[in-house]
Image (cartoon, rainbow, N blue to C red):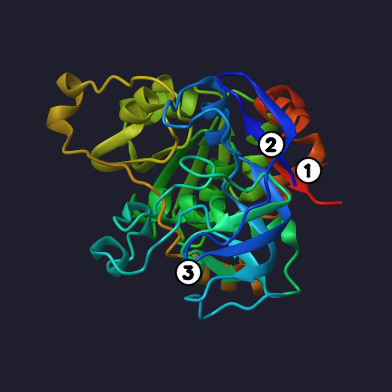
Amino acid sequence: MRALVYHGPRRISWDTVTDPVIEDPTDAVVHVDTTTVCGTDLHILRGDLPEVKPGTVLGHEAVGEVVAIGSDVHHLRPGNRVIVSSVSACGHCRPCHEHMFGQCRGGGGWILGNLIDGTQAEFVRVPFADHSTHRHPSPLPADEAVLLAEVLPTAHEVGVRNGQVGPGDTVVVVGAGPVGLATVAIARLHQPRRIIAVDLSAARLEAAVRMGADAAEVPGTMIAELSDGPGADVVVDASGEPEGFVLCTRAVRPGGHIAVVGTPGKAVTLHLESLWRKNVTISTGQVDTSSTPWLLELLRFGRLPVASLVTHTFGLERAAEAYEVFSHGATSGALKVTLRRE
């Protein structure tokens, strides 16, 4: 088959590789219809994640059709269309029993496109298939369904839920990339008083308003007013940048909550000398995708209008070009970039 292979920092290519096969009884092999390029993939390409070895097929989000199953797969059959979760879950360890699939101790967690070959390929082997896939309802477009593999659960679980967004809150979302925009849309469901989006890109700020933000700005007046005044109840850092986190610490109110969603690519300074008396709670976390079934129902019934998050679609064989467009999202206008089998 053909797949996008990582060859070391800043080196990827569309190569011919060996077809995946069933290796464990809990495996399934999925024929990929739609996959994505994620911000974490850019971190890998820059060399920020040394655990990803050269020769690894990248990608960890997908929608496709099951073509083979292991002897211990009970809830799938060849021909089923599925959403492949970015997180694999053994289903038997203590974290999995607590629905903390991102912390799986039975061989799961984030392994696709990280420790094993991933989804930016014609086929992918999915470990623990019964617990790591969700049936894809046929009326739901693949470009929306693939958002359930990681983007929407991350925004909900790590941003909105960990940040404890509630009615009447002032919420600030720093970073209006795909996850930040999804955070805006999901936070709106919890009836906050207002949502403020912050980003350096004018196009992304416009997208934030379309997704439900009450205001959007390049860091400036509103953040200064929050810093000098009451502060925000919840600040979600979806930027992945050290400067973005510092901005969050300035905007949060005493007793407020900072939910760190973005994946930092370098060291971030925690200024405890200025935070210690504010009674601030800081949460981080690996997405679990335990909320995917709930989010799927919201999408099915039109309660979560996120189709506009997907701005660019490429054929699978144009994956390297897709990376280039996505990596320059501030100028290309790219939000979520999908790759589709043609």
From mark 2 to mark 3, how far is it between C-alphas?
26 Å
Please give the label number shown on residue 316: 1
Dot 3 falls on a residue whose secondary structure is loop
Mark 3 is surrounded, within 10 Å at the Cα level, by few (under 14), some (14 to 19) or many (20 or more) other residues, namely some
From mark 1 to mark 3, how far is it between C-alphas?
29 Å
Residue type (three-letter) at the residue carrying disc 3: Pro
Of 293 and 116, nearer the camera is 116
Please give the label number shown on residue 18: none
Outermost residue on the right side: it is 342
Please give the label number shown on residue 25: 3
Which quadrant holds residue 257? top left
Asked if residue 286 is positioned above or below residue 307 in the image, the reply reads: above
Dot 1 falls on a residue whose secondary structure is helix
Name the residue: 74% across, 34% down. Answer: 15
Looking at the image, tell me whether mark 2 or mark 1 is earlier in sequence order: 2
Name the residue: 39% across, 60% down. Answer: 167
Name the residue: 54% across, 27% down. Answer: 54
Which quadrant holds residue 5? top right
Residue type (three-letter) at the residue carrying disc 1: Leu
Looking at the image, tell me whether mark 2 or mark 3 is earlier in sequence order: 2
Mark 1 is surrounded, within 10 Å at the Cα level, by few (under 14), some (14 to 19) or many (20 or more) other residues, namely many
- Is residue 202 among what the camera can see? yes
Q: Which residue is mark 2?
A: 4
